[in-house]
Amino acid sequence: MNKTIILALGLFICQITCKAQTSAVTSKGDEVILYDNGTWKYANKIDTNTKIETNKTAFVKGSSATFKVSSTNVSSVGINIDPKKWTFKKGETGEAAEFNFELKDKEAYGMVITEKTEVPLMTLKGIALENAKSAAPDISVVKQEYRTVNGLKVFYMQMQGTIQGIDISYCGYYYSSPKGTVQFLTYCGTKLLPQYRAEMEALLNGLVAN
């Protein structure tokens, strides 16, 4: 798959508004997604009240994550990356992401969206899902749980959705404190997730307190 295409599609949570699918409502009031190929499915119902389990594993950064990328918006956190595997660059003016990441010579990516305002984690989850649904109406939550990452309590969510006919999976950490809010997302084509999941999780586990 063309890297430029997958990278551009990956930014849908904060930028893309066009839709490759059409939403419709049945006579019974159920929302469905109509695809260009003539198929359809029921739209995902977002439920922010579902009980979230806590993963008891203590997630920590890897020993090779030696380079710290520090946020200027949320000074209380940074991200330790393995510079031999991941490249990063600051987001451009007007772009929602403060930093963008790319797995070297691979098709896995990441982004960090930061805000100076504290947002409750469940509210943050709802916002992330609604934003994703605006570009990928068939977005669904594959997995969700609370985790402790380098001493920080975060909400983990894996999502999957279709944009422009391409199936993309997202794995992300959501963190908030009085000093600000962090959405740390990794993504790739869904078929590539088994191949890149370990590297994506390692990048996410680089989230640390400054």
Image (cartoon, helix red, strand yellow):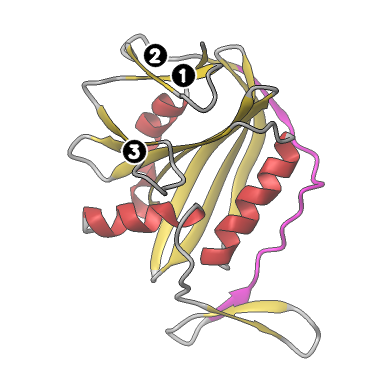
Q: Residue at x 63, y 53 (%)?
A: 129
Q: Are marks 3 and 1 in contact (CB under 8 Å)?
A: no
Picture mark count:
3
Q: Amino acid at mark 3?
A: Tyr
Q: What's the magenta region?
A: 40-57
Q: Is residue 55 magenta?
A: yes
Distance between the Cα atoms at labels 2 and 3? 16 Å
Please give the name of the residue rendered at 49% of the width and 80% of the height, measured from the top-left corner. 35
Q: On the rendered structure, is 50 left or right of 160?
A: right
Instruction: Choose between 38 and 134: the one closer to the eye.
Output: 134
Q: Which residue is mark 2?
A: 62
Which is in the foreground here, disc 3 or disc 1? 1
| Residue designated by label 3 | 196
Magenta stretch: dominant secondary structure:
loop
Q: Residue at x 39, y 53 (%)?
A: 10
SS assignment at label 1: strand
Pointers 2 and 1 in contact (C-beta within 8 Å): no
Query: Which mark is in front, 2 or 1?
Result: 1
Outermost residue toward the left?
105
Label 2 Cα crowd, 10 Å radius (few <14 / some 14-19 / many 20+): some
Residue 207 appears in the rendering: no
Q: Position of residue 111 (x, y in %)?
A: 41, 39
